[in-house]
Amino acid sequence: MGPGLFSDIGKKAKDLLTKDYISDQKLSIYTYSNTGVALTSTAVKKGGLSTGDVGAQYKYKNTLIDVKVDTGSNILTTLTLTDIIPSTKTIASLKFPDYSSGKLETQYFHHHATFTTAVTLKQCPAVDLSVTLGTPTFALGAEASYETATGKLTKYTAGISVTKPDSCAAIILGDKGDTIRASYIHHLDSLKRSAATGEISRRFSTNENTFTVGGSYAVDNLTIVKLKLNNHGSLGAVFQHEVIPKSLLTISSEFDTKALEKTPRFGVALALKP
C-alpha cells in the first residue's frame, strides 16, 4: 500500500509504448512439474543469430530460486528471499562464469517510503541507491549510482508521479539532468486492457524533442491491438491473440513513415503455457 519502487514511476506508460514491440522471432514453452518446479524453454532468432535458454524456477514459502542456462554456456542464478526482516525483499544474482556480474539487492517497503540498495559483487563495487516517498496516489523519488573505483556518481535520476484509478501521470529528470520525460496514460475500461498514452521527452544537450502517442485496444477477450507513433515518423503496431488459454501469439511491425523505401521490421513471438 506504499508508494512502490522508484522504477515504477512512469512504468505503465513506458510499458504500453515499448512492451511487445519486438523485431525478432521468439518461441517460449512453459511447463510445470508435480513438485512445483516451473520450467521454461526459449529460442530466439535475431537476424542471422539464433540463441536459446532453459530455465527452472522453484518457490518454497518465502524463497524463490531461479536458474537459467543459455546456449553461450552462461548460468544465471537468482535467489529471492521475502520477509527475512519484516517488509523486506532480498535478491542475490550470480552469473557463471562472469562472477563480476553478481549483484546483491535489498528492498524495504513502508506505507509511506520505499528504499532499495544494490551492490555489485566485485573488487571495486558499484552501489545503486533509490528512495521513494509518498502514497499509492502520489510518489516522489530519486535514484543514484556510485562507482567506488572512481569515487564518482555515474547516474542520478529524480521523478514524480500522480496515480488515479483510471490514469497515471509522471515526470522524470534523468541522464544527470540532461533529459526530462513526461508521460500520461489513461485506461479506457475497468479491466485496463484498453488505454491511451502520450510521452514527451527533451534532451537539453542536443535540443532534441521526441513526442510519442500510442494506445491499446481490446478487440475482444482474446485479442489486443497496439499502435504508437512519434514525431520522427516511426510507426509501430502489435497484434496479440490468445490462441489457446494462457498462450499468446504476438506479431509486431515497425516502419519509418518518412522513408517508406526502407524495409519494415517484423517480429513474431509465441508463448505456450499449460
Image: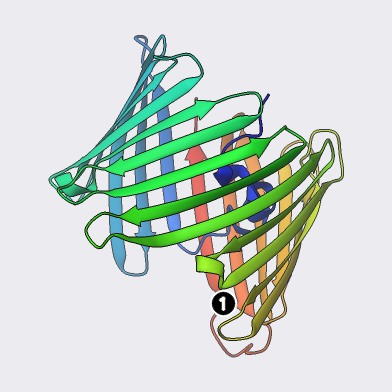
Tag 1 residue = 264
* Residue under the point 61% across and 80% down: 204
Q: Quadrant of the N terminus?
A: top right
Residue 175 spot, x, y in % from top left: 51, 67
- In terms of secondary structure, where does tag 1 sit? loop
The answer to which of 7 and 256 lies nearer the viewer is: 7
From this view, report whether residue 227 is shown above or below residue 44. Answer: below
Residue 97 spot, x, y in % from top left: 12, 45
* Residue under the point 57% across and 44% down: 6
* Residue under the point 21% across and 42% down: 121
Based on the displayed image, in which of its 4 quarters is residue 261 positioned?
Answer: bottom right
Badge 1 local density, few (<14 within 10 Å), some, or many (20+)? some
From this view, report whether residue 264 is shown above or below residue 38. Answer: below
The answer to which of 240 and 77 lies nearer the viewer is: 77
* Residue under the point 65% across and 23% down: 111
Based on the displayed image, in which of its 4 quarters is residue 80 positioned?
Answer: top left
Identify the amino acid type marked 1: Pro
Residue 39 spot, x, y in % from top left: 35, 27
The answer to which of 118 and 72 lies nearer the viewer is: 118
Figure label count: 1
Residue 260 spot, x, y in % from top left: 64, 87
Furthest toward the front, the residue is 151
